[in-house]
Image (tube, coloured by chain):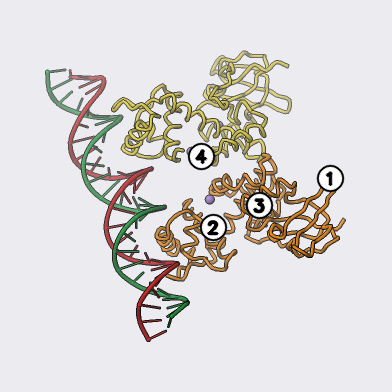
Chain colours: A orange, B yellow, C red, D green
DNA sequence: CCAATAATTTAGACTAGCCTAAATTGTGCC
DNA sequence: GGCACAATTTAGGCTAGTCTAAATTATTGG
């Protein structure tokens, strides 16, 4: 239906609207490793196809049709990531590139069967929500670890804006998505945290904690 | 490394060399649904990259490098087909199109992990051999059903040159790849065959039988 | 209020991959 | 041998997607 480049532009716009509320030409170009002029060309094209609303000099937004297409791509991307981690045993920080390719494989039955095969997962290995077939996102109340309550059990469900360095740090400390732990202490002096779990624990700086999203984990 | 179009050309040439011993411009164009002039362009390009030997007016062959690339594509195609049938539950005649896309996803670790996940299958759902990482094909002694011995157990392992109509016919008779049966009778008059298996059986015309490859199936 | 600056768009060019139409080549038959 | 015909290549043209450089627009600090 749409070319790979068209799809990547739509997804980039959607991501920027989510993250920043606005999608400017320069930022789209940066995400896609292209030049602003190339993005302008594509914005015109996508506007012509009714996927994008282009306000020249003021960025782009998605039409309903564009948003639907974006959510379908996000769905495919996150389902493939889930497959790569859960079934093929990739680490959660190794899967993005490949999913970036797989998301463009075009087949409704494929993606629906994959979804079923994975047991209709609601969140991907990075803790990001997977839209359903109709583009509805599962909801979840998350708390930044920096604001989580000391003494209670929590579960790490997502890493916000995770650089590779951050992911490596978490890996080294044995802290992965899905890990349940008790927030044992928060130092008043520097906001650093102490986590404990069955087989271990770790200390985290406030800078790291600011990137971590948790849910309360009773039981 | 190579574009989708380059890869599809290489695979088409390889397939023609296998099937017919020669790969002429017109036949390549026919396989890829393009025109002969487009194929000529691509042959020059691939010759320039050292993948193809182009003898103008006399067709194309593959260099060692080209053959290796072709086998890698065949490997990916057949592993994906196996995944689609064995894990996602597609029927064997529904998977070709999607595998045609998936084979172009570029990631060594992906394909090696997929191979392991599937248990290093040696044949795809159509009974075709899956090259290993080094391009070696598993071997198997097959017998055309038309020449198989009456009264013995055989197993259907491949359908040669199967049109959609043929596949549908087999489907309707309950005859799938992997099916073990006893060749109960062969009519002298028209060469038609009678097959029986635990839960049923069927009759086949000589024309159909000529497309079916079997292996002896003791036990 | 306007001049400097940053963002954006426009203009013009290039490549990959495809096409049609015309020219060329190989082949096999009289 | 040469003619007819099919296959192939060449010539020329188109679109999608990218780029650089130039022109344009929005913004903002003095
Ligand atoms: Mn992508
Ligand atoms: Mn993800
Ligand atoms: Mn293909
Ligand atoms: Mn196959």
> Residue A11 has which mark?
2
Looking at the image, is B200 positioned above or below residue A35? Answer: above
Front residue (pair C13, B69): C13
- Nearest-to-viewer mark from 2 and 1: 1
Front residue (pair A181, A58): A181
Q: Which chain is home to disc 1?
A: A
Q: Which residue is mark 1?
A: A199
Give the mark, 3 or 1, whose residue is nearer the N terminus.
3
Q: Is mark 1 within 8 Å of ligand 2?
A: no
Q: Is mark 4 within 8 Å of ligand 3?
A: yes
Question: Which residue is situated farthest in the right direction here?
Answer: A219
- Kindly indicate whether the residues beneath marks 3 and 4 are on one polypeptide chain: no
Binning the other alpha carbons within 10 Å of mark 3 as few (below 14), some (14 to 19) or many (20 upward) gives some
Rendering coords of residue B188 (x, y %): 56, 14
Q: What's the residue at 58%, 47% (across, down)?
A: A99
Asked whether the viewer can see residue B42, the reply is yes
Q: Are marks 2 and 3 in contact (CB under 8 Å)?
A: no
> Residue B104 has which mark?
4
Q: Are marks 2 and 1 in contact (CB under 8 Å)?
A: no
Rendering coords of residue C11 (x, y %): 28, 63
Q: Are marks 3 and 1 in contact (CB under 8 Å)?
A: no
Give the mark, 2 or 1, whose residue is nearer the N terminus.
2
Q: Viewed as shown, does residue A40 lie left or right of B102?
A: left
Rendering coords of residue B15 (x, y %): 45, 28
Q: Is mark 2 within 8 Å of ligand 1?
A: yes
Q: Which residue is mark 3?
A: A166
Looking at the image, is B95 positioned above or below residue B128? Answer: below
Q: What's the residue at 71%, 51% (across, down)?
A: A121
Q: CA distance from mark 3 to mark 4?
A: 32 Å
Front residue (pair A124, C27): A124
Element class at badge 4: loop
């Amino acid at each position: 239906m749409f070319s790979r480049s068209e799809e990547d532009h739509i997804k980039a716009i959607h991501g920027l609207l989510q993250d920043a509320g606005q999608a400017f030409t320069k930022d789209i170009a940066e995400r896609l490793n292209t030049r602003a002029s190339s993005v302008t060309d594509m914005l015109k094209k996508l506007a012509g196809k009714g996927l994008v609303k282009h306000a020249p000099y003021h960025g782009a937004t998605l039409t309903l049709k564009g948003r639907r297409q974006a959510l379908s791509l996000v769905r495919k991307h996150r389902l493939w990531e889930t497959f790569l981690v859960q079934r093929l045993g990739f680490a959660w920080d190794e899967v993005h590139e490949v999913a970036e390719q797989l998301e463009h494989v075009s087949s409704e039955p494929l993606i629906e069967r994959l979804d079923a095969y994975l047991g209709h997962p609601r969140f991907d290995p990075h803790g990001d929500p997977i839209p359903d077939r109709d583009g509805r996102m599962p909801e979840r109340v998350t708390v930044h670890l920096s604001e989580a309550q000391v003494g209670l059990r929590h579960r790490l469900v997502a890493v916000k804006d995770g650089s590779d360095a951050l992911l490596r740090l978490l890996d080294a400390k044995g802290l992965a998505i899905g890990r349940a732990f008790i927030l044992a202490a928060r130092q008043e002096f520097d906001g650093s945290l102490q986590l404990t779990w069955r087989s271990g624990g770790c200390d985290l700086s406030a800078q790291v904690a600011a990137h971590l999203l948790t849910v309360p984990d009773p039981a």
